[in-house]
Amino acid sequence: MKAIYYEKYGEADVLQYGEQPTPEVKEDQLLVRVHASSVNPVDWKVRSGHLLPVSGLNFPKIPGHDMAGEVVEVGQDVTTFKPGDRVFGMLDTGLGGAAAEYAVISEKAAVLMPENLNYVQAAAVPLTALTALQALRDKGELAQGERVLINGASSGVGSFAVQIAKALGAGEVTGVCSTDHIDLVKSLGADRVVDYTEEDFTEKKDCYNIIFDAVAKSTYLDSKDSLCQNGRYVTTVPNPKDIALGYALSVFSDKKLRLLVADEKGEDLELIRAWIETGKVWPVIDKEFPLREAAEAHRYSEGGHAAGKIVLVVE
């Protein structure tokens, strides 16, 4: 099969496009003909070697965590899917594998695609939407009517977080983004928008029940005065400034620092699928690249200015 792969850690130039073995399906897995994948920051962080303790030194590696495609084969224990089904999901097979013509995913992580999305749109959903849902609902424990601030509201995760916060019943959602993305964030349902080029939200001392940093640009230490009593600061990547002192202070404070590692839960993706089909949530796509141009897509993602998701179209 054709795939994007790399044989050493490094810059985007290490990515190659060529032949790799088609993965073999296990008893509880589906083999999917991938029609679209996407690029997430974790993909180039793994590729660059930043997650070496987790990613290891086994090569070649195929990047990509999100996929949307058609089932071509099912394992002997699979009961809920059949060849021909259109599915999407966040791969649960390790550190990637979706930037290829074929990928395997377990039955429990795969979900039928929303009827109102095409493959490109569906590939933009899984990792970022799951991250946003689990950050707000599970780590943030969002309650009806609470005030939420999303830092990085125009990012892949942030664009879903704004919408999911509203779907979960937030009373007021504030999105933080650049000037160029204000209209987008408003269109996603944000009640207020803070332009970070003009204003630092940590200096205003508004009272938020939850601050979710979707882009790992702020810190708990700088943000805690903007949290209400019993507030929660949620992030996917703790700022180095927070790792020791921030966690220590959080333990003895009613304002908590909470770290999320997204889970590939199929039942959570089913909920997101239902929201998409009823129009409560919708993927935002910044740019599409053909699979063979994955290196350019990685560079674009590393630039940090994408509004929404970057999708790889598998030809």
Image (spheres, rainbow, N blue to C red):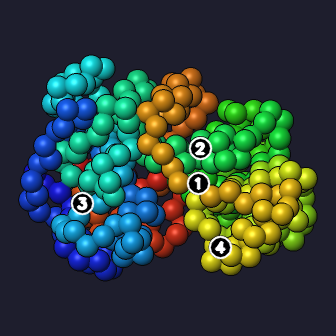
Query: Badge 4: how crowded within 10 Å, few (<14), some, or many (20+)?
Result: some
Q: Is residue 75 above or below residue 190?
A: above
Q: Which mark is residue 260?
A: 1
How many marks can you see?
4
Please, what secondary structure does the residue beneath circle 3 have?
loop
In the figure, is residue 301 to the left or right of 253? left
**Of the image marks 3 and 2, the number of the one nearer the N terminus:** 3
Mark 3 and 2 residues: CB-CB less than 8 Å, in contact?
no
Distance in Å between CA atoms under marks 1 and 4 = 14 Å
**Of the image marks 1 and 2, the number of the one nearer the N terminus:** 2
Q: Amino acid at mark 2?
A: Gln
Asked whether 183 or 266 is in front, the reply is: 266
Question: Can you give x and y, in whole percent of width and height, for residue 46 in the image?
Answer: 37, 68
Please, what secondary structure does the residue beneath circle 2 have?
helix
Q: Looking at the rendering, which quadrant does residue 207 occupy? A: bottom right
User: Can you tell which of label 4 and label 2 is closer to the viewer?
Assistant: 4
Residue at mark 2: 134
Q: Which mark is residue 243?
A: 4
**Of the image marks 1 and 3, the number of the one nearer the N terminus:** 3
Residue at position x 34%, y 67% from top? 55
Residue at position x 15%, y 47% from top? 23
Residue at mark 3: 62
Distance in Å between CA atoms under marks 3 and 2 = 26 Å
